[in-house]
Amino acid sequence: MNSLLFLISFILHIISITTIFLLFQQIQAIKHNQKEQIERMLHHFVEEIREENERLQAKLQSNLSPQQRDLNESMKELNRHTKERNRNVAAQLKQNEKIENVTNKMVQTEKREDKVETSLESKILQLHEQGLSHEEIAKKMNRGKTEVELFLKMMQHK
């Protein structure tokens, strides 16, 4: 009896999952179609606006005197040249920025100073050459007097 109920439950679950999946696919298809329709409608709307603008420009051009037309063409040409020059200047600025960054990195690298730490032995030798006694060297270096004496004797034998 239990196995029959499990079998019926399993079949109902499969049917419900399949139904949910099919509904999901239909919703996705509808969303996709709506998206395409909106894109086509917007494209058509933009085309209508563009055509209307062209008609308006043509009408304005026909109402302009020849001098005004020449001036208008000159302004358009000037705008084109200005935009081109702005692009060139922007590219040049980017290039200068890159060069400046590289230069700054090089300067920072050069500014780094190597730190040289002298060894304990060399410090002891330097202090001995300055004329300090074995006891004074031992105090300054926080070492034992015998350790300093032994080291200095070894260095004298070399």
Image (cartoon, helix red, strand yellow):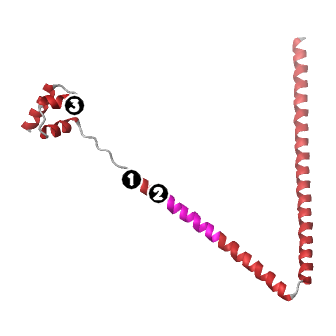
Residue that carries the numbered disc 1 in the rendered image? 111
- Asked whether residue 89 is drawn in magenta, I would say yes
Q: Nearer the viewer, residue 33 or 142?
A: 142
Mark 2 or mark 3, earlier in chain: 2
Q: Distance from label 2 to label 3 (Cα)? A: 41 Å
Determine the residue located farthest toward the top in the rendered image.
1
Q: Quadrant of the C terminus?
A: top left
User: Of the residues shown, which amino acid type is indicated by label 2?
Assistant: Asn
* In-image side of 74 versus 153 (left or right): right
User: Of the residues shown, which amino acid type is indicated by label 1?
Assistant: Lys
Q: Say what secondary structure mark 1 lies in.
A: helix
Residue that carries the numbered disc 2 in the rendered image? 104
Q: Say what secondary structure mark 3 lies in.
A: helix
Residue drawn at the location 11% of the way across and 29% of the way down: 149
Q: Distance from label 2 to label 1 (Cα)? A: 10 Å
Span highlighted in magenta in the image: 87-103
Determine the residue located farthest toward the left in the rendered image.
157
Residue that carries the numbered disc 3 in the rendered image? 141
* In-image side of 47 versus 155 (left or right): right
Expressed as whole percent of the image width and height from the top left, the position of residue 60 reads: 90, 79
